[in-house]
Image (spheres, rainbow, N blue to C red):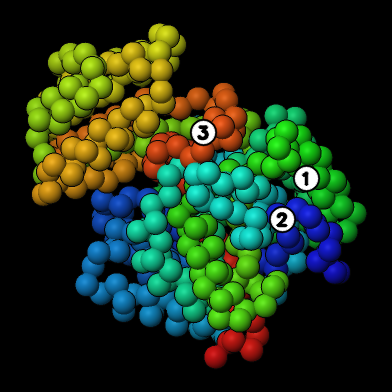
């Protein structure tokens, strides 16, 4: 079925999705996003031990914990060879030309719904002032793109951990597509599997029939109209997770285009999962900070001086965490409460600044790091991981206050992208797992 023209005028297209064949153990195949557990080699070592020599998306990615290692070039070369081998050796079932409705079961039984499709990278722009249909929600760090280009450049496959947000309070797009997919398939999923390391479970149904795809197209056209500004610009999707991966795909496409790749080349598109901002299973979690090579006292003094925040010593990390959660969820006007902790010490810092937490703190931390050349920073998903780093690695950690969904799209539309690592869609183990793949080369480029 030819669907090339079905979504004309929209940033979405119907991809050819590759799923491992039925002989593959999907629990070993599916692996969490590469930008998680960046300070936890043990997590990735356990994942490698669990997978062993079985076919796995783990062999197709480079976890960011290894980005600084001396054997990075060898790892990237092995990744590309494995991609070619999986395609050659029949690891994948025949491609599915369609959209996939996805349901991810998370901790506590929450279900997050998504729609897997491909998006046109020509309709995406990560620059803060951009008025593209697909925009970054957070600051994109240009220096982080080239190392990732090394992995995508020349790769035969992509597998997404990118999640885009749709501004759809009426639940007319993602959720409706899910019902269409279940009806088309008679409720029989394309795949269903538990996920490793407490990641929950994931199930998908395919939507391939023209009648169903046409209904999705109509819903997306209406949603695009609803998200059109007075100046004519449309803000349809926001990059919630994986923005640097999306920016990398864009950069590689621009590079290929300059080298003569034709319009419509597979590299012009990126495979993503779209999630409704208003999905009941979607939570916004703050991304915490961990600073290495600093002391808690000097960090707190610097932040308090720059922000005018009031500092209060806490009995313990857990006590400080509980107090901050209570105060931040109480809606105390413009007050925001941060937790600073290192080893056994913990303090609360309260500000009355109306700006978002990352907008208050990140510029101060950037200045602090410039004046402390030996210090370093990392961005941590989950309070438990932050506490572990504080107690075991002696990092000075900062627990950030949450960001509300209310006004999220209008804020990004009006003010541009937020500071980098402002929020996370769920805790670390709720991130997207690599499972589906798509070829990003033409047949004659197989080598």
* Residue beneath the point at 42% across and 75% down: 79
Evaluate whether residue 185 shows in this view. Answer: no
- Closest to the camera, between mark 3 and mark 1, is 3
Kindly identify which numbered label has been placed on residue 12.
2
From the image, tell me which residue sits under label 1: 220
- State which quadrant residue 386 falls in: top left
- State which quadrant residue 310 falls in: top left
Disc on the earlier residue, 2 or 1? 2
| On-image quarter of the C terminus | bottom right
- Badge 3 marks a residue whose secondary structure is helix
Q: Indicate the position of residue 375 as horizontal and vertical percent values.
A: 14, 46
Q: Is residue 151 above or below residue 42?
A: below
Q: Give the residue at the far right of this rendering.
A: 211
| On-image quarter of the N terminus | bottom right
Evaluate whether residue 437 shows in this view. Answer: yes
From the image, tell me which residue sits under label 3: 415
Q: Is residue 126 above or below residue 30?
A: above
The answer to whether marks 2 and 3 mark residues whose Cβ atoms lie closer than 8 Å is: no
The answer to whether marks 3 and 1 mark residues whose Cβ atoms lie closer than 8 Å is: no
* Residue beneath the point at 41% across and 26% down: 356
The answer to whether marks 2 and 1 mark residues whose Cβ atoms lie closer than 8 Å is: yes
Distance from Cα at disc 3 to Cα at disc 1: 25 Å
Q: Indicate the position of residue 319 as horizontal and vertical percent values.
A: 23, 18
* Residue beneath the point at 42% across and 9% down: 333
Distance from Cα at disc 2 to Cα at disc 1: 9 Å
Q: Is residue 164 above or below residue 69?
A: above
Q: Indicate the position of residue 147 as horizontal and vertical percent values.
A: 36, 66
Disc on the earlier residue, 2 or 3? 2
Q: Is residue 167 above or below residue 433?
A: above
């Amino acid at each position: 079925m030819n669907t090339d023209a079905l979504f004309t005028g929209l940033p979405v297209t119907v991809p050819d999705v590759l799923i491992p064949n039925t002989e593959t153990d999907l629990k070993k195949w599916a692996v969490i996003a590469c930008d998680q557990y960046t300070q936890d080699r043990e997590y990735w070592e356990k994942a490698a031990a669990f997978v062993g020599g079985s076919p796995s998306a783990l062999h197709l990615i480079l976890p960011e914990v290894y980005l600084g290692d001396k054997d990075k070039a060898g790892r990237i070369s092995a990744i590309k060879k494995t991609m070619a081998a999986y395609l050659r050796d029949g690891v994948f079932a025949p491609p599915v030309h369609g959209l996939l409705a996805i349901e991810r079961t998370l901790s506590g039984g929450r279900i997050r719904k998504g729609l897997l499709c491909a998006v046109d990278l020509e309709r995406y722009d990560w620059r803060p002032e951009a008025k593209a249909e697909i925009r970054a929600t957070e600051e994109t760090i240009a220096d982080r793109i080239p190392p990732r280009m090394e992995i995508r450049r020349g790769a035969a496959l992509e597998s997404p951990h990118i999640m885009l947000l749709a501004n759809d309070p009426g639940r007319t797009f993602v959720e409706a597509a899910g019902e269409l997919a279940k009806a088309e398939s008679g409720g029989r999923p394309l795949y269903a599997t538990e996920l490793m390391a407490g990641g929950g479970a994931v199930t998908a149904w395919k939507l391939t029939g023209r009648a169903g795809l046409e209904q999705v197209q109509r819903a997306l056209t209406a949603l695009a109209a609803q998200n059109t500004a007075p100046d004519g610009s449309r803000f349809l999707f926001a990059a919630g997770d994986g923005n640097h991966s999306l920016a990398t795909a864009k950069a590689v496409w621009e590079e290929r285009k300059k080298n003569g790749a034709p319009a419509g080349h597979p590299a012009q598109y990126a495979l993503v999962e779209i999630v409704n901002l208003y999905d009941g299973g979607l939570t916004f979690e703050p991304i915490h900070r961990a600073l290495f090579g600093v002391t808690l006292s000097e960090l707190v003094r610097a932040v308090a001086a720059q922000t005018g925040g009031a500092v209060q010593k806490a009995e313990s990390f857990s006590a400080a965490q509980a107090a901050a959660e209570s105060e931040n969820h109480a809606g105390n006007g413009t007050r925001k409460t941060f937790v600073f902790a290192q080893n056994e010490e913990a303090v609360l810092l309260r500000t009355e600044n109306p700006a978002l937490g990352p907008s208050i703190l990140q510029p101060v931390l950037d200045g602090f790091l410039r004046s402390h050349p030996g210090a370093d920073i990392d961005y941590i998903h989950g309070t438990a991981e932050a506490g572990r780093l504080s107690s075991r690695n002696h990092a000075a950690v900062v627990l950030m206050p949450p960001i509300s969904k209310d006004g999220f799209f209008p804020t990004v539309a009006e003010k541009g992208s937020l500071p980098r690592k402002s929020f996370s869609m769920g805790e670390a183990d709720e991130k997207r797992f690599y499972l589906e793949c798509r070829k990003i080369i033409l047949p004659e480029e197989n080598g």
